[in-house]
Image (cartoon, rainbow, N blue to C red):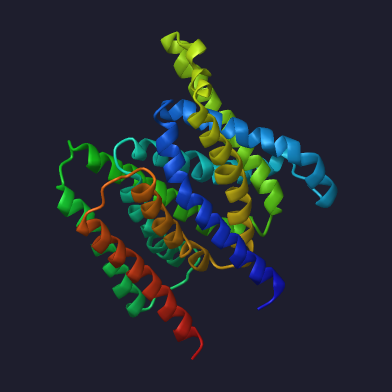
């Protein structure tokens, strides 16, 4: 394995670890701010950090993005960070971080399906079998909670699944776009796009409601400040760079499997730190989801070596 591949795997592990804890900090931040304000402040911190790092990065790497390049990057940025984070934060208002982490373990499944359609990476029947096993794990959560379109948990599940779909689409299309642009260029523009979009949405909302003074009030809470530092610098800016780098070196399916590490960390953090309850069906559903996804990828790897 060459150095670039080793760095890519290290980036994927670091990315998954940070994302695993992000659910915890989002839940904490939601106690002080609504979702739109949270995302606005998150990407303000993220973009501020990017601006501070920009002079150094420009010396180390040639950044030559043009206005015409935005035609490619802006739609890409709509998937991540805009839709991914928006669905994630709103979903966490209706479900626990443990459940959200388990549901987002379906990202590798969705990535495999999208990669097969757009990148022509065909799955074997064994991979399909393991994919079905993972889907059964997710459906177990729906059934045990009770499928009711009026139930708040159902709304949360749908939003988290949409977040997972956005992440999967981003992973697939990143395989193409990272061949055209440097990962630092992508990270900077994606962060700027998130900063503009979410701050515009927050300011419009406060202007309509006549509550502009309340926009910065969450920063009076120490827990919110610490959450924003983690979410803005590590969970937004750094993870964008890490995921872009990993996807520039590795196949989308290989990178997506590291989301399972995020699921384990999220469940553990929710139970140990937030003292969320976890029932037997959370455990069984998690085992089915993660076992199915890992099994599908391991079989694929072994099959390719024969």
Give residue 113's position: percent from left, percent from top. Answer: 39, 64
Which residue reaches farthest top? 210
Q: Which residue does the image show at 46% across and 15% down from the upper left?
A: 206
Q: Which residue does the image show at 18% across and 40% down from the upper left?
A: 149
State left or right for residue 52 relative to residue 20.
right
Q: In the depicted view, which residue is nearer to us: 124 or 215?
A: 215
Q: In the depicted view, which residue is nearer to us: 158 or 19?
A: 19
Which residue reaches farthest right? 59
Q: Is residue 168 above or below residue 26?
A: below
Give residue 47's position: percent from left, percent from top. Answer: 65, 35
Camera sees residue 83? no
State left or right for residue 184 relative to residue 93.
right
Camera sees residue 174? yes
Give residue 101's position: percent from left, percent from top. Answer: 37, 52
Q: In this view, does 14 lie above or below 297?
A: above
State left or right for residue 66 relative to residue 177.
right
Q: Which residue does the image show at 85% across and 47% down from the upper left?
A: 59
Q: In the depicted view, which residue is nearer to us: 229 or 206?
A: 229
Q: Is residue 39 above or below residue 70?
A: above
Q: In which quarter of the image is the N terminus?
A: bottom right
Which residue reaches farthest bottom? 306
Give residue 278's position: percent from left, percent from top. Answer: 26, 52
Q: In which quarter of the image is residue 133?
A: bottom left
Q: Which residue does the image show at 70% across and 47% down from the upper left?
A: 185
Q: Quadrant of residue 290?
A: bottom left
Total labels: the figure holds 0
């Amino acid at each position: 394995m060459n150095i670039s591949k080793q760095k890519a795997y290290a980036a994927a592990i670091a990315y998954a670890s940070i994302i695993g804890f992000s659910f915890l900090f989002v839940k904490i931040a939601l106690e002080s701010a609504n979702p739109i304000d949270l995302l606005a402040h998150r990407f303000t911190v993220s973009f501020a950090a990017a601006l501070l790092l920009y002079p150094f990065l420009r010396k180390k790497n040639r950044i030559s993005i043009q206005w015409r390049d935005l035609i490619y990057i802006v739609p890409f940025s709509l998937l991540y960070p805009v839709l991914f984070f928006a669905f994630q934060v709103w979903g966490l208002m209706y479900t626990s971080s443990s459940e959200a982490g388990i549901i987002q373990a379906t990202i590798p499944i969705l990535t495999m399906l999208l990669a097969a359609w757009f990148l022509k990476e065909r799955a074997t029947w064994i991979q399909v079998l393991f994919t079905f096993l993972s889907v059964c794990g997710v459906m177990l959560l729906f059934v045990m909670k009770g499928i009711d379109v009026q139930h708040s948990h159902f709304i949360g599940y749908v939003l988290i699944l949409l977040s997972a779909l956005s992440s999967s689409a981003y992973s697939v299309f990143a395989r193409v776009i990272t061949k055209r642009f440097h990962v630092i260029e992508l990270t900077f523009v994606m962060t700027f796009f998130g900063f503009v979009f979410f701050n515009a949405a927050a300011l419009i909302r406060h202007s309509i409601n006549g509550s502009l003074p309340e926009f910065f009030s969450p920063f009076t809470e120490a827990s919110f400040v610490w959450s924003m530092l983690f979410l803005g610098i590590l969970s937004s800016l750094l993870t964008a760079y890490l995921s872009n780098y990993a996807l520039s070196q590795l196949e989308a399916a290989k990178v997506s499997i590291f989301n399972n590490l995020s699921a384990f960390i999220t469940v553990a953090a929710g139970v140990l730190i937030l003292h969320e309850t976890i029932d037997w069906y959370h455990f069984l559903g998690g085992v089915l989801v993660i076992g199915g996804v890992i099994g599908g990828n391991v079989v694929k790897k072994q099959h390719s070596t024969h």
